[in-house]
Image (cartoon, helix red, strand yellow):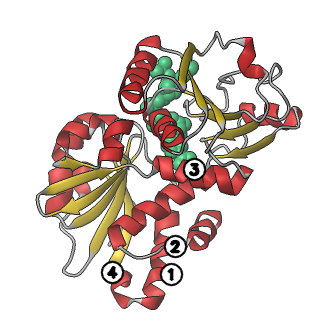
Amino acid sequence: MHDNQLTLDQIKPLADGRVGLAVLGFPINHSLSPHLHNAALAQLAFHDEKFKNWKYGKVELAASDLGKALPKLWDCGYKGLNLTIPHKVEVLPLLSSIDPAAEIMGAVNTLVWKEDGWHGCNTDGYGLEAGLRESLSVELENAQVLILGAGGAARAAAAQCLKSRCKKIWLANRSIGRLTEVVHVLSKTFGSKRIQSFALDSLPNEVGNIKGLVIINATSLGLKREDLCPIELDGFDPSCKIYDMIYNPAVTKLLEQAKYGKMSHANGLSMLVHQAARALELWTQESVSVSAMYSGVRA
Ligand code: NAP
């Protein structure tokens, strides 16, 4: 069984009794998911031998190959998949069913094997809420939240905030077309009263004055060291709490600014771990050790 990175052509039927799990993305080299999942699987195998045959790997795949890869992985004996950039939205038409909560988010990050094909779920929203609580002691109920971005991760974040009864969300994105679409989809389910949206470069001053505002970076700005900061924090109240979904690099320019402004801040590692734990629970139907996942990723 592989521990390595595969391409579409290298995916082969698994030996009898083996169970495959994998993350699909492009690029995929940077992904920490195998470290998290294999550490938690080792912990599960300690109590139940069958999990010794479960292994989690990674597959590098262009979006145009998803349509070939999903049936192949299903035929080869894979029981669970994660999706990362850029597959979370593109995969939707290829699924046999989608969890209603994921449908609202308009993106899936977890696929569960079912008799009739792949079933799509989204554990990013759950992971974010658990990560905010663990890293910043934030409860979403009654919170005011500024979400930067309108891609798959931002949609999951916004839907989770609204579902968990936040007071208001402020959505800001570079491209207005995508922003408008997200607001439209969320308003259909949650109503429009608690949602406001802006272009990323024209945030209104009043947002900066909100005490205890939770700011979540769900753009990919910060993944590369040379990236600019998605927003400047100098106009924001020091009581703001900053969560950057990016975890590699561990300290983005946004987090550097937060530190400089003495604001509470955290990177996206806790979200990564909690969304992964929930996905593994969906595949194994067992409760999963978050601390084993942290040990796996730190090792
Ligand atoms: P995505 O669907 O590709 O969305 C990317 C977002 O970033 C869009 O809103 C895009 O704006 C914005 N963006 C990209 N380049 C930009 C630039 N130069 N200036 C301003 N905005 C820019 O990606 P995603 O799946 O939502 O992921 C977003 C981020 O969250 C990634 O960094 C990912 O690693 C992270 N993430 C972390 C976790 C975790 O567990 N910690 C989970 C999921 C995602 P436009 O619409 O204008 O293009």
Secondary structure state at the residue bearing disc 1: helix
Give the quadrant of the N terminus.
Answer: bottom left
- Let me know if residue 3 appears in the view: no
Percent of width and height locating residue 33: 48, 58
Going 60% across and 41% down the picture, which residue do you hit?
246
Local crowd size for mark 1, using a 10 Å CA cut-off: few (<14), some (14–19), many (≥20): some
Query: Is residue 270 or residue 128 the one in the foreground?
Result: 128
Question: Residue 39: which disc?
Answer: 2
Q: Are marks 3 and 2 in contact (CB under 8 Å)?
A: no
Residue type highlighted by circle 1:
Gln
Tell me the residue that label 4 is attached to.
Answer: 53
Q: Which residue is mark 1?
A: 43
The CA distance from mark 1 to mark 3 is 24 Å
Question: Residue 54's x, y, as percent?
Answer: 35, 75
Q: Amino acid at mark 3?
A: Glu
Quarter of the image for residue 208 reads top right
Residue at 18 percent of width and 62 percent of height: 114
Q: Indicate the amino acid at tag 2.
A: Ala
- The earlier-in-sequence mark between 4 and 2 is 2
Which mark, by number, is residue 129?
Answer: 3
Q: Secondary structure at mark 3?
A: helix
Q: Label 4 vs label 3: CA separation?
A: 31 Å
Foreground tag (1 vs 3): 3
Q: Residue furthest top?
A: 202
User: Quick check: 276 left or right of 19?
Assistant: right
Are circles 4 and 2 on residues that touch, CB within 8 Å?
no
Q: Are marks 1 and 3 in contact (CB under 8 Å)?
A: no
Measure the C-alpha gap from mark 3 to mark 2.
23 Å
Q: Earlier in the sequence, mark 4 or mark 3?
A: 4
Name the kind of residue labelled 4 in the image.
Asn
